[in-house]
Amino acid sequence: MMRYGMVIDLEKCMGCHTCSISCKMQNNIPQGMLWNRVVSVGDEGLDSVEGLFPNVKRKYIPIACQHCDNAPCQKACPVGATYYDENGSVQIDYGRCIGCRYCMAACPYNVRVFNWEEAERHPDFNYGDGVVPVRDVGVVEKCTFCKERTSEGLDPMCVECCPAEARVFGDLDDPKSEVSRLIRERNGEQLLKEKGTKPKVYYLGLNGEV
Amino acid sequence: MTIKTKFNLPTVILGIFAVMGFSAIGYQLVNGLGVTGMNNIVSWGTYIMLFMFFVGLSAGGLIVSSSATVFNIPSFKVVAKPATILSTVCVIVAAGFIMVDLGNPFRMLNLLLHSNFKSPLMWDVMVISLYLVINVLYLYLMTREKPNQKAMKIMSSVALPVAILVHSVTAWIFGLQIARGAWHTAIMAPLFVASALDSGLALLLIVLVLLATFKVFVVEKKLITTLAGLLVTFVAVDAYLLLSEMITMIYPQGEAMHHAEVLISGQLAPYFWIQVILGLVVPLAILLFKKNREKMRLVVFSSALIVFGVLCKRIWLLFSAFVHPNIAEGQGITLGYNQPNIWSTVGTYSPSLVELMISVGLISFGILLFSFLAKKILVQKSSQENQFSDKEGKIYSMVKNG
């Protein structure tokens, strides 16, 4: 069976936010929200650093839905609008969501975003490849591992566009896949592992931070 | 009857509030939940806070009236009717707050069509529906010409555990979430039950004294004193559980300290300390003494403090889990609104005007519904018992003089 997963190499990531923007374009995400964001460890600002000059270091961590195997959001949804698809990824049925936002409270990673108001876009029309469904006001949305692309055998848009080639997408159940090999050989770590959510997104070079 | 003139002006004002609230609901339906102050970090706000609060308030009534039969405390039987009306109205208001919080209320039927029984929210939908049905049935049984004692007995034996279950399940909506350190504690359900018992009973006491003031329903002073004794026990249990929770969070000086700091000295400190001092310490100091429990004015004053304290507790309880996201690294989280700065690393929230109007409107509707039901169910009885009017007068003056 397929079990889609992703590896993000933080030693390659240079914090260019191309993944965030390509994701926003591909998935027709309105103004004011992102499915995929790049945070930097340190203070509150953009491109923040850890430590005091000259002993500083900088680390970028791209964060989107972790597609947990034990997803708290899936258990929380009272109407089953959040579900696991045939590849183990966590998906949302936008037509079923009642907008109670319990899943947002349940997600330890704050990766779910809500359509609080009528979507505004710059430019003022739907962008992306046209296959991704448009979401209504009052529903929750998040990263889908670009299911419209991956079902065609393509990589998710963030993987496709990352200029540092820091992202790899593949089958975690296949020990010979590149994702499995990287996790094995380079000690892939999960975010907030102690929560027991069993994410399918692994980070290389996280060193237990976050 | 003097009731009409006395109820009139407040009724008009409450009516206006209710109409304003319902128009605000219409406005929110058209424009989406963006008209509230909620965002992607603080994704629940006033509505859910008041939902918790009103579920709790509905406890007092049903627990007092059903324990009259279950534990055979005949003196409580007198207040069973107003208590159950209060309980019913509070749970209806609570359900109202859940409905206005939905982003897609027109899909509410999905709760029945596609129930996910792994969700604590689904459990709550079921148990609150059951609770409402029990309240209404119980009220129906009580208001029969000749109440069927056997049915009443069975009903109240069901009502009591269901009441406890309602508050526990509501607590588990929050307490079972591993994502939210501030909520994730096994003591959440007992804490909810304790707060529900003290705020619910305090509200019942206020309402009983008010009903006596408006000569709608008469209770003996002695019963108020007995109930105040029960109330002080509940407040003490609530305080004890809170102490137990706080000391467990603080003592190790570990990860949980992060959440404790928000309450002790952080953004939510005002609500926390108001609850501790005005909602627990002061009422305890007053009601611990029997001679204070005999003074109606002090009982009502302490009850009002307790209700207000529990409201503050609902505020800090809900929002403490949203202040610091688990991963709050540089730039943070997108808030979900098309505005110049879409980012934040901490959760901030203040209710919008629409949110306040809807909340005030729903509460006003609840008060109107209560006074309507109280007049319908209670007044006919007391008008038949006009011979007790001098007793009523005595209680009225007693209330006025404290």
Image (spheres, coloured by chain):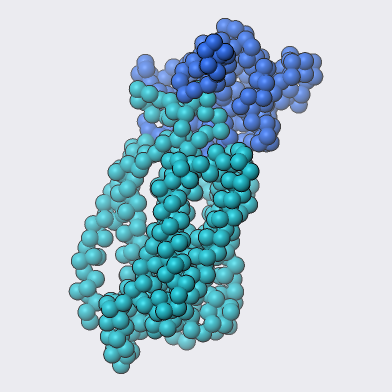
Q: How many marks?
A: 0
Q: Residue at x 60, y 41 (%)?
A: B253
Point out the residue furthest to the bottom here: B387
Report whether A162 appears left or right of B49. right
Q: Residue at x 28, y 90 (%)?
A: B390
Q: From the top left corner, tell me how far across and down residue B3 is, in percent.
A: 24, 77
Question: Compared to B88, does B53 lie above or below?
Answer: above
Question: Compared to B190, does A115 lie above or below?
Answer: above
Is any part of residue A9 visible from this angle? yes
Image quarter (top left, top right, bottom left or bottom right) of the C terminus of chain B: bottom left
Is any part of residue B79 visible from this angle? no
Question: Compared to B96, does B76 lie above or below?
Answer: below
Q: What colour denotes chain A?
A: blue
Q: What colour denotes chain B?
A: cyan
Q: From the top left corner, tell me how far across and down residue A30 is, in percent.
A: 42, 24
Q: In the rendered image, which quarter is residue B240 located in?
A: bottom right
Q: Between residues B283 and A55, which one lies in front from this camera angle?
A: A55
Report whether B253 appears left or right of B135. right
